[in-house]
Image: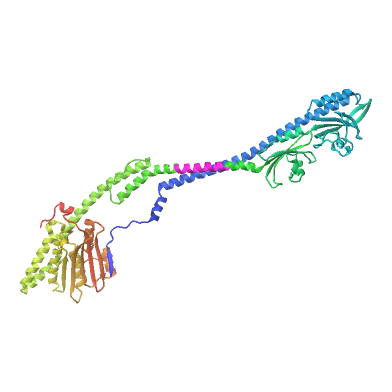
């Protein structure tokens, strides 16, 4: 069976997706996301730039610090070597100016010179053949010293400059095994008035150089070491590991430059290498700093910036939420008010507050709302006046065709002498008119509405020559409740003219009124031809009209019910071809209600 119901009001979309979508498109969310995104992006870019800047600065500072330390070591060693040269030159001067090498005065002067320096170990003069000519202090020379194999002895023959030997154990004299650096050079001396050439050897204790080098601290693991011009290690803090082959230093790049800084990875670790050269000895002071210690500084900086960025982001989010809430709060308040207005509450004013734009918008909206209320009041008044006029016209022009047919039927019955039928028909017509007018009232009881349709059916039964029969039943409790009048006649007219009139068999119209859960339900059933889906939809949309009746129309009945009781009430249809149609009228159960139109006065009976 086909069913249909007049549409009342569109349902609002429901569901979490709509709420989520509206939240994602809210101005507070957009402001929060935009402000947070921009601020976080700026903070990330600034942090990245600061990190790169500080990391590069830390690396440059570490390298510069290492260079400064090596420069300081170089300077200190330069001063120390210069002092050694001064001592050597002073001893050479004393020897060259003495008339004879074996003069006691010379030894006395050299002893005095030795005592001025704690690091001066010994002074000795040898012939080119290796014979000891002079020694301070005097001591016994060891046998088998193999002078020809010692660098300090062979170097002076190749240069006129003072030569410096690598650190070594002094093994020339007995009971002397000091770790020394030897200075040697060919010098001139006199022996018994004869000029001769010899090799002057002065040994300096290496401890002073060792202590100067040990003081170098390049981070926790960094150090400095010294190379001679040939690449031999003069000093290394881990010299024993070097000799044991447990540590390796890549000296080839060091020997290529006198002044250089570079990154070395030959040992498997990244190390910053700084090279400086002692001008007087040709020794190279090499500083070694480990890159991972600089990276540690970078890592600490990275952790600091990460924490700083997290705090900034958190602060930005909190600030943006508060700021967006401050901006969006009056807008949300305005939105809620507009929503109430959209739901029909036109008496809700908007609090004019917030930013300038929101304040101006609120003022304009209040003015618009005031104007809408004025227009609504005007429309309501005009519509009620119009409805009253239409109803009065309807009631005063009770379908002349119906009245004409009824009077014709009365005349035919009178001509046939059927007085009782004439009386019955006239009485029903009189009561039909009386209830239709109802002293101009629009609201009557269900009892009166059922009586009205009963008189109508009585009249039609005479006109249709008993082609149909009707049944009207109602619960006693329903009868006092109120309804708007003339809601049954258009539906019954449809049943007669479109459902039963064309039937070959006897028709049946059944009207039933009952109270159900606080609602009045009046059903009108017929066993007529029924309606197709197309015709049924036409009735619901207004495309089909009831004909031959009072002219009120089914759609007009539904609109009147919705207008008075509410849009959720009205008519519903069930129909099937060759089986019949059922129309159900639903409205709330009310007693002692007045229609606004009735208060203005009605048409007298």
Q: Quadrant of residue 442?
A: bottom left
Q: Quadrant of residue 56?
A: top right
Image position of 534 with respect to 158: above or below: below
Q: Residue at x 37, y 42 (%)?
A: 357
Q: Quadrant of the C terminus?
A: bottom left
Q: Residue 170 appears at what percent x and percent y?
A: 83, 35
Majority secondary structure of the magenta segment?
helix
What segment is highlighted magenta in the picture? 302-318
Evaluate whether residue 213 shows in this view: yes
Q: Residue at x 6, y 68 (%)?
A: 423
Q: Is residue 531 left or right of residue 269?
A: left
Evaluate whether residue 547 shows in this view: no
Q: Residue at x 86, y 36 (%)?
A: 155
Q: Residue 292 appears at what percent x and percent y?
A: 64, 43
Q: Is residue 270 left or right of residue 196?
A: left
376 or 109, nearer to the observer: 109
Q: Is residue 317 magenta?
A: yes
Q: Is residue 72 left or right of residue 196?
A: left
Image position of 312 with respect to 437: above or below: above
């Amino acid at each position: 069976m086909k069913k249909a119901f007049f549409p009342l009001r569109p349902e609002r979309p429901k569901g979490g997706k709509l709420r989520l979508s509206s939240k994602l498109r809210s101005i507070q969310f957009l402001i929060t996301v935009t402000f947070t995104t921009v601020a976080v992006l700026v903070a990330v870019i600034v942090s990245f730039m600061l990190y790169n800047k500080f990391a590069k600065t830390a690396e440059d500072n570490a390298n510069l610090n290492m260079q400064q330390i090596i420069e300081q070591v170089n300077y200190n060693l330069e001063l120390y070597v210069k002092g050694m040269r001064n001592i050597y030159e002073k001893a050479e001067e004393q020897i060259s100016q003495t008339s004879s090498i074996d003069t006691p005065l010379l030894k006395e002067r050299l002893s005095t010179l030795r005592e001025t320096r704690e690091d001066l170990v010994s002074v000795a003069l040898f012939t080119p053949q290796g014979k000891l000519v002079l020694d301070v202090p005097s001591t016994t020379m060891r046998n088998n010293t193999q002078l020809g194999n010692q660098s300090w002895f062979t170097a002076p023959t190749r240069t006129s400059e003072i030569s410096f030997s690598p650190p070594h154990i002094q093994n020339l004299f007995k009971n002397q095994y000091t770790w020394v650096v030897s200075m040697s050079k060919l010098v001139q001396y006199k022996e018994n008035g004869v000029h001769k050439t010899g090799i002057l050897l002065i040994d300096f204790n290496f401890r002073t150089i060792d202590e100067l080098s040990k003081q170098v601290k390049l981070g926790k693991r960094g150090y400095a070491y010294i190379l001679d011009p040939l690449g031999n290690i003069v000093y290394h803090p881990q010299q024993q590991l070097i000799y044991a082959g447990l540590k390796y230093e890549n000296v080839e790049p060091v020997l290529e430059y006198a002044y250089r800084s570079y990154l070395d990875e030959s040992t498997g670790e990244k190390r910053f290498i700084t090279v400086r050269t002692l001008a007087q000895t040709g020794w190279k002071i090499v500083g070694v700093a480990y890159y991972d210690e600089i990276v540690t500084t970078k890592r600490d900086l990275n952790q600091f910036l990460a924490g700083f960025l997290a705090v900034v982001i958190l602060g930005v989010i909190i600030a943006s939420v508060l700021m967006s809430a401050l901006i969006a709060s009056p807008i949300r308040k305005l939105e809620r008010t507009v929503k109430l207005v959209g739901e029909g509450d036109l008496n809700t004013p908007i609090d004019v507050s917030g930013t300038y734009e929101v304040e101006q918008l609120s003022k304009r909206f209040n003015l618009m709302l005031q104007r809408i209320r004025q227009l609504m009041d005007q429309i309501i008044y005009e519509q009620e006046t119009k409805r009253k006029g239409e109803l009065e016209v309807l009631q005063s022009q009770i379908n002349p065709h119906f009245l004409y047919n009824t009077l014709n039927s009365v005349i035919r019955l009178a001509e046939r002498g059927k007085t009782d039928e004439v009386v019955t028909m006239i009485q029903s017509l009189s009561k039909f008119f009386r209830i239709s007018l109802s002293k101009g009232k629009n609201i009557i009881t269900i009892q009166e509405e059922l009586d009205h349709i009963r008189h109508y059916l009585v009249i039609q039964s005479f006109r249709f020559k008993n082609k149909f029969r009707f049944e009207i039943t109602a619960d006693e409790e329903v009868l006092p409740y109120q309804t708007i009048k003339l809601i049954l006649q258009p539906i019954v007219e449809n049943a007669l003219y479109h459902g039963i009139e064309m039937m070959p068999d006897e028709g049946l119209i059944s009207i039933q009124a009952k109270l159900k859960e606080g609602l009045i339900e009046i059903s009108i059933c017929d066993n007529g031809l029924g309606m197709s889906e197309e015709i049924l939809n036409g009735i619901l949309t207004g495309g089909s009209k009831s004909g031959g009746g009072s002219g009120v129309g089914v759609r007009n009945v539904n609109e009147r019910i919705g207008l008075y009781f509410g849009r959720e009430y009205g008519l519903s249809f069930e129909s099937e071809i060759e089986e019949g149609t059922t129309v159900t009228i639903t409205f709330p159960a009310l007693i002692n209600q007045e229609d606004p139109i009735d208060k203005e006065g009605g048409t007298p009976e």
